[in-house]
Amino acid sequence: MLEVCYKLTRKFFRAPNRPCKAPSGSVEPPPRLHFNAMAQAFDIVSRITERSGQLRLAEQKVAEAILNDLSSAASASIGELAQKAGVSLASVTRFAKAMGCRDVREFKFMLAQAVAVGQRFFDGVKTIPPGQPPELADVVYNDIHAVLEVNRALLNPDALHRAAELLRDARMIYSFGMGGGSTMLSDEARYRLVRLGRPVATYHDALLQRMVAATLDKADVLLVFSTTGNVPEMLTNCEVAKEYGVKMIGITALGSPLAGMVDVLLPIKALETDFIFKPSSSRYAMMMALDMLVLELALLQKDRSQEQLRRLKYVLDMHRGGGDRQPLGD
């Protein structure tokens, strides 16, 4: 979708009299924009929705045609858009100006930016499964099951073993995560590792991560969580740590920029559906990878792990009582 947005940008903003192809051996400079794109930035879809009721009938028809199919409207010519709405070219021009744009070209550029977000966020209501809550529960369960099945196939025993060795031998383990699921799982890593007697700390703030990364050395290990592996702040902070020779374990998307930086990759695959109202199932992929990593570490230091877990069980039973099968601190 971003590629479509880029092509549309080139199509509608090519400087006048510039040849379509740069001369051989030269590099074509970027197209010259005739307006300040940053200053004009606003959510064009929300503006169309808010202002459509105040427009003339012809312009309302343009708004309706655009909102019914944003992708097609973003790529259509002014003539095609006018024909689809059943109005004149002048009505399309007036509509663009009513939306706060200088002309149709600027309007189409902003519409292309909006489309790049993804059509599923405009058609979300259409994706709601019919039926009562039990059926919605099946939708959630099936998505969790599907993401676990896919990510089960991505588990690599050799990579898990190498990552567990790094955690076992680390002077200190630092767990980084940013965003929703990644933040939660980085904290989860701390809870899991401390039960096995490993020194661990978690950081989520971008600036704190950078400060911590600058203090690390080769005896430390960085455990990084990122669903996309493409968060700029996270990548920059990992580059700082890498500069000081810190070993990194990444639980992140295969083929992502972060995946290319880490020493040991535990790849995950997110499976996002068109049902945007459901919580993301990607966190289950990260959780499974983390559980397998910690299990591998526990088995790698079996005697020590057994003693650590015994102590935990004893102290917790003395504190709260309970049966033999209660979880250890969960």
Image: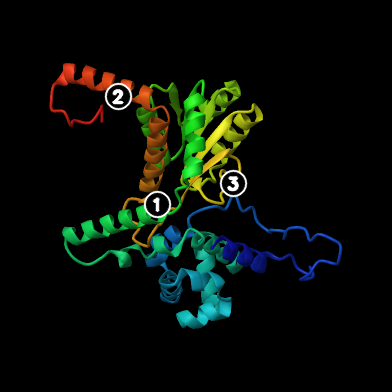
The residue at 68%/59% (across/down) is 34
Q: x and y percent of residue 8 in the render?
A: 61, 67
At 35% from the left and 62% from the top, the residue drawn is: 124
**Label 2: which secondary element:** helix
Which label's residue is closer to the chain start, 2 or 1?
Answer: 1
- The residue at the far front in this view is 303
The residue labelled by disc 1 is: 152
Amino acid type at mark 1: Arg
Callout 2 amino acid? Leu
Q: Is residue 191 left or right of residue 247?
A: left
Residue at horizontal 50 percent and vertical 60 percent from the top: 114
Instruction: State the residue in front, 246 or 208.
Output: 246
Q: Quadrant of the C terminus?
A: top left
Most foreground residue, 195 or 82: 195
The quarter of the displayed image where residue 235 is located: top right
User: Is 263 placed above or below 26 here?
Assistant: above
Residue 59 placement (x, y as % from top left): 45, 73
Per the image, the residue denoted by label 3 is 257
Q: Secondary structure at mark 3?
A: loop
